[in-house]
Image: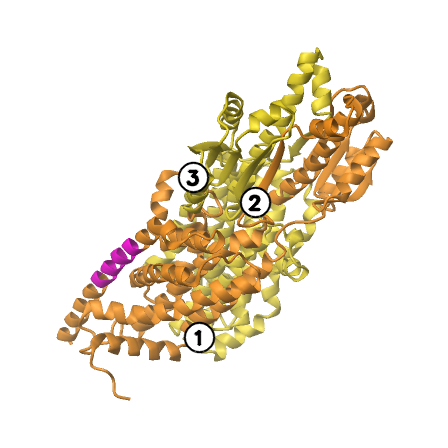
Chain colours: A yellow, B orange
Amino acid sequence: MRKALRNIWLITRRELNTFSRRPIFIVIMFVAPLGFLVFFTSLMSAGLPTKLPAALVDEDNTHVTRQLTRILGTMEETQFVLQTNSFTEARQAMQRGEIYAIFRIPKGTTEAALTQRQPVISYYTNDAYFIPASLLMKDMRKLSEMAGLAITRETMRARGFSDDQIMGTVQPIVIESHPLGNPQLNYSVVLSNLLVPGLLMLVIMLTTSYALGMEWKRGCQKKLYSMSGNNVWVAILGKLMPQTALYTILMWLIDLVFYSYLQFPCACGIPRMMLWGFLAVIASQGFGLLMFEAFPGHMRMAMSACSLLGVMQFSLAGFSFPVSAMDVPFQWLSNIFPLHHYFLIYVNQALNGYPISYVWTSVVALIAILLLPQLFYFRLRDAFLYKEYVP
Amino acid sequence: MRKPTFPILHVWLDELTDIVKDEGILLFIILLPLAYPLLYAMIYNTETQRELPMCVVDDCMSVRSRDFIRRVDATPEVKIAAHCTSMDEAQELMRRRDVYAILRVPAEFDDDLWRGRQTVVGLYSDLTSMLYYKVAYLGVVNVSQELNRNIKVRERQSNTTRREEQVARWPIRFDEVKLYNSAGGFCAFLIPPVLMLILQQALCLGVGMSMGRSRERFRGLVIPPTRHYKNAVAIVLGRGLVHFLVFLLMAIYMAICVTRWFGLPQLGHFWDLIGFFVPYLTACTFMAMFYSGFVYRREDCILLFVFMSIPLLFLSGVSWPGSSIPPFWQAVGTAFPSTWGANAYVRIQSMGASLGDCHSEILALWILSGIYFLLSCFMYMFEIRKAVGRTILN
C-alpha cells in the first residue's frame, strides 16, 4: 500500500513536470476555462435580450396609429430602428439582417376602427432568428390584443361603466405566469450555468485522453507502467490526479463567481454545488478514460470520440431544446453524458432547491460513469503492455 | 509518377497525396462534415415541444373551470397529465419531473366571472428548458384569450346583431406571420448556422492535423526540405487549394442534400450559394492555415479547435441576438469567418436574400481572406527561413 502511494506520488511529480514544459497544457487547462467564464458571463450580462431592432410600417399615419406605435415603442423588447411607409423597404431591411420584425398598420385602419369595420393589422417576425423573434412576437401580440381592447374600453367608459367593470369585461381571465427559480427569465443564469461548466467538462474529457495518449506517443507507456509497479490504477491515478485537483479548483472558482459574485440563484448553498461540481469533474475524467479504453493506446481516435460526443452533449443537455421533445433514441443517448446529469442536478439543487433525492438517478449515473472504466481495466493493461502509438 | 515542376501544382499534389494516405485527416475532412450535420439535424428534427405534460389544481370545480381545463388540454402545446387536489401534490409531481407546469384555477374562478370581475389563474412552469415556459404560457394564454372574447361578447355586452357581435369580438383583427420558419421550429433555425460552423471547424481540424503531421515528420518544420518549398505564396495557395476544393463539395452537400433531407428552408439560388461559399471557404481555409501554425503535434489541433465551436456559435449572433452582444465581443466576432458566414448563409438560404443583400458580409469575408492569406504567408516565410537555417547548420 505504502509503495503504491509512493508510486502515485512519483508519477504525479513526473506529470507536473510534463505540464510545466508544455505551454499547450497551461493554455487549454487553465486559460481557456477562465476565458469561457469571462466570455459567457459578459456576453449575456443583459440577462434577457431587450430593445431588439424592428421596423414600423405605418401606412395610415393618423394620431391613433401614432399613439399605438408610441406604446409599442415603450415596450421592453421592441425598438423601432426603421420607420417607413413602404413594406418592401422594411422587408429588404429584414433580409439585410438589420431588423427582426415588422409591424404593419395598413392604410385606413383608423377609419375602419372608428366606423366598426374590423381593420386588420399585421406583424411579421423573422423566425430564422428564433430568440429575438419569439420575444418580439410576444410584445407585438400583446399590443395588437390591447389595441382592440382599448376600443372596447373607450366605448364602455363613454357609457359610464366603472374601471373594475371594464376590466372584468375586456379581460375576465388573467393568466399570472410564474417561471420558477428564475422569475426574471434571465437567460444568463441558466445558460452560463450550462455552458461554462459544460466547456470545462469538455476540456476535461479531451485533456484526459490527451495526457494518457501522450505516453504512447512519446513511447513512454512501458516506463510509466513499470514506475507504477505494474499496476494500471496506480499509473492512472498518478497521471490524472494533478488534473483532478486543477479542474476541481476551477469548477469551484466558477461556482464562487456565479453564486457569490454574480449572485445567480443558488437555493442549496454554495458548498453543496461545489460537491456536485467535484462529482462532475471526476465523472468527466471517467468519461475521457472510458473513451481511451474504447480505443486503447489510440490517442487520436479517443480524442475524436471525446470531441464528437463532448460537443454533442451541449445539445443533449436539453436547455434550449428539451430532451423530452427529442426522438426516443436521443432521450436514451442523453443519459450517457455527464453534462446532462450535472445540468439536471443543478436545476434541482441550485435553481429549484428541491431535495437531492428527486434526481438520485443522475447522481448514480455520474458515479456510474466514473466507475465504468474499472470494468474495462484489462484493456488499459493490454494497451500498456502491447499497444504502440497509432498516428 | 512525374511530379509537375510548377510550385503551386507541386505543393497541391503533395498535400493531396498526403491527405489521402492519412486516415486521421480523412476522418476530419470527409467523415465529420458528412455525418455530423445528419446527427445534429436528427437531434432537433422534432422541431418543437408538443403536448407538454402539465397538471391542474382545480380549486373551483365548476362547469366553467372544467371547460377551461378541457380547452387547455385540447391545445397542441399542452397535455393535462394529472389532476391534483392541492398545490402540495402538484409540486410533488413537478419535483419528480412527471409534469413541467402547474395550472391553478382559484376557488373563486366561477364566482368572479359571474360577478363580472377579473379572476386570476396561476401558471407555474419549470425552467429546465426555456421552451417549457414558452410552450406552457402560449397554450394557456391562447385559451384564456379565446374564452375572454366569448365572455365579453355573450355575457357582458348585449349585442343585437351577429355583425355587432363579430366586431365586439375583434374590434381590430391581427395577422401573425412567422417569416422564413413558419412552424417556428428549432431545426430550421439552428441547423443552418451550425452547418457553417461545422464547415469552419472541420477545416481547422483537417488543416491543423495536416500541419501537425508535417511538423512531426520534418522534425518541427512545417515544410519538407525540398526545392519546391521556397515560395510562401505558392505553399499557401497549393495547400489551401486542396482543402478548399474538398470543402466546397462538402458545402454543396450540406446546402443541397442535408437541407433537402431534413426539410430545412431552401430559398437560396444555387449560384448565389456558390458566390457565398467561395469567399467563406477561402477565408476559413486561410484562417485555418494561419492558426495551425500553433499546432506542434497532430493531436494538438483537437485540443485547440474543438471547443471554440460553442463560443463561436454564440458570437455569430444567430442563437443569442447580435444586437444584444456587447460591442467588445462583437468586435472579437468579426475576426472569425463563421460570424459573417452564418449570417450570410441564413439570409441567403433561409430568407431568400440575394448576394447583393449580403454584400457587406461578402466584402467582410473577402477582407478576412486577404488578412489571413497575408498572415499565413508571413507564417510560412518565417518557417522557410527556419528551414533554410537548419539545412545550413546541418
Residue that carries the numbered disc 2 in the rendered image: B178
Mark linked to residue A222: 1
Q: Left of A12 or right of it: where is B188?
A: right
Read off the magenta span.
Answer: B366-378
Amino acid, disc 3: Ser
Q: Earlier in the sequence, mark 3 or mark 2?
A: 2
- Does A92 sit above or below residue A213? above
Which residue is located at x 20 percent, y 67 percent?
B232
- Crowding at mark 1 (Cα within 10 Å: few <14, some 14-19, many 20+): some
The label nearer to you, 1 versus 2, is: 2
Amino acid, disc 2: Lys
Q: Do labels 3 and 1 share a chain?
A: no
Mark linked to residue B349: none
Residue that carries the numbered disc 3 in the rendered image: B323
- Does A139 sit above or below residue B247? above
Element on which disc 3 rests: helix
Picture coordinates of residue B234, whole percent (x, y): 22, 70
The label nearer to you, 3 versus 1, is: 3
Residue B83 forms part of the magenta stretch: no
Q: Do the residues labelled 3 and 1 touch (CB within 8 Å)?
A: no
- Does B80 sit above or below residue B286? above
Q: Which of A144 and B161 is in front in this view?
A: B161
Chain assignment, label 1: A
Indicate the quadrant where residue A365 lies.
Answer: bottom right
Residue B55 visible somewhere in the drawing = no
The label nearer to you, 3 versus 2, is: 2
